[in-house]
């Protein structure tokens, strides 16, 4: 079984991106800038944002975090996003999710300029992805895609099963694999016979949020299994895939932690650089 080392792959990607930032700096006399907006005091969000800022700085991006208290008015956030949309030193804007209940997520996403939408969640970028046009691709599915392509460069005709249909994960992942000529099935909480769906899959991407949902006897021999899930347990973080069981049958599997997570952050940096390049052109 191939243990897919997301940490190592992310490190390699960050090295390449660092070189690219240096080259862009020489060419344009400026560097891409990433601005993250963090609302509230939720610990996981604070940790994610700190990691994003650290990684951005390490590869030479200009990085800024704007923090608001939980009680901030929606208008203040929307006005700040509009200001950042018009700021040429800002290439990418990310508003860390989830948001407090009184702030409309859709309004926030739609206020970010599609050209600076490094999370790939703006409806224009969602449309671009499903049409096969250029645009930002959500970071986690992009990271999963790069990991899958490292294991298997030709995915034509493979059966791929997404577990989970969120905009952030399942739907975008399905589009990426469709573009690779996979036959894609998107499953979700109302899917009947999920085990049977999984058993025919050459590729399984689990993005659910249920600890060890995917069992060893759900997985075909030689399948590639990507575990996006992050579930807190007393023993630490575990994924949506029963690692010990599935590692005995799968051809390749991502661990949790150390699989998809590091690639998500590296792909955020990649998206910021892509936004910068598209703006220069
Ligand atoms: P979400 O809650 O938006 O979506 C979960 C999806 O799972 C839904 O589409 C739902 O229909 C489906 N689902 C629920 N129960 C199911 C069941 N019994 N069988 C099949 N499908 C079921 O979640 P999300 O934002 O897509 O995140 C999913 C998981 O991925 C979470 O654990 C989250 O923490 C994790 N995540 C990880 C990263 C990373 O970088 N590793 C990034 C984003 C999210």
Image (cartoon, rainbow, N blue to C red):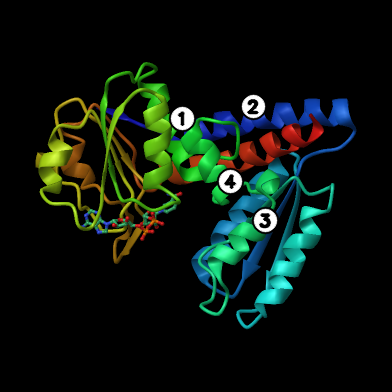
One can see residue 233 in this view: yes
Residue 101 point in image, percent of width and height: 51, 78
Q: Which residue is mark 4?
A: 124
- Quarter of the figure that contains the C terminus: top right
Earlier residue among tags 1 and 3? 3
Check whether the beta carbons of the residues at disc 2 and disc 3 lie within 8 A of each other. no
Earlier residue among tags 4 and 3? 3
Check whether the beta carbons of the residues at disc 1 and disc 3 lie within 8 A of each other. no
Earlier residue among tags 4 and 1? 4
- Residue beneath the point at 67% across and 63% down: 37
Look at discs 2 and 3 and give the one toward the viewer: 3
Look at discs 4 and 3 and give the one toward the viewer: 4
- Quarter of the figure that contains the N terminus: top left
How far apart marks 4 and 3 lie (CA) works out to 11 Å
How far apart marks 4 and 2 lie (CA) works out to 28 Å
Earlier residue among tags 2 and 3? 2
Q: Quadrant of residue 272?
A: top right
């Amino acid at each position: 079984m191939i243990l897919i080392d997301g940490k190592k792959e992310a490190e390699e990607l960050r090295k390449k991106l660092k070189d690219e930032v240096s080259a862009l700096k020489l060419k344009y006399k400026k560097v891409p800038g990433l601005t993250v907006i963090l609302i509230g005091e939720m610990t996981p969000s604070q940790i994610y944002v700190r990691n994003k800022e650290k990684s951005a700085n390490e590869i030479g991006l200009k990085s800024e975090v704007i923090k608001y208290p939980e009680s901030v008015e929606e208008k203040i956030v929307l006005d700040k996003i509009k200001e950042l949309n018009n700021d040429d030193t800002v290439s990418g804007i990310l508003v860390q999710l989830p948001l407090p209940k009184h702030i409309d997520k859709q309004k926030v996403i739609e206020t970010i300029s599609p050209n600076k939408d490094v999370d790939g969640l703006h409806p224009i970028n969602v449309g671009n992805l499903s049409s096969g046009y250029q645009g930002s691709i959500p970071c986690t599915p992009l990271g999963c895609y790069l990991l899958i392509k490292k294991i298997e460069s030709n995915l034509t005709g493979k059966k791929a099963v997404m577990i989970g249909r969120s905009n952030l994960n399942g739907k975008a992942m399905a589009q990426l694999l469709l573009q690779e000529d996979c036959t894609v099935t998107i499953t979700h909480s109302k899917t009947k016979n999920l085990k049977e769906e999984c058993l025919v899959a050459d590729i399984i991407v689990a993005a659910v949020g249920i600890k060890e949902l995917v069992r060893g006897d759900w997985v075909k021999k030689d399948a590639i299994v990507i575990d996006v899930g992050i579930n807190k347990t007393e023993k630490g973080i575990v994924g949506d895939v029963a690692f010990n069981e599935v590692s005995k049958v799968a051809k390749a599997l991502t661990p949790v932690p150390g699989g998809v997570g590091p690639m998500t952050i590296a792909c955020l940096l990649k998206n910021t650089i892509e936004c910068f390049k598209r703006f220069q052109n």
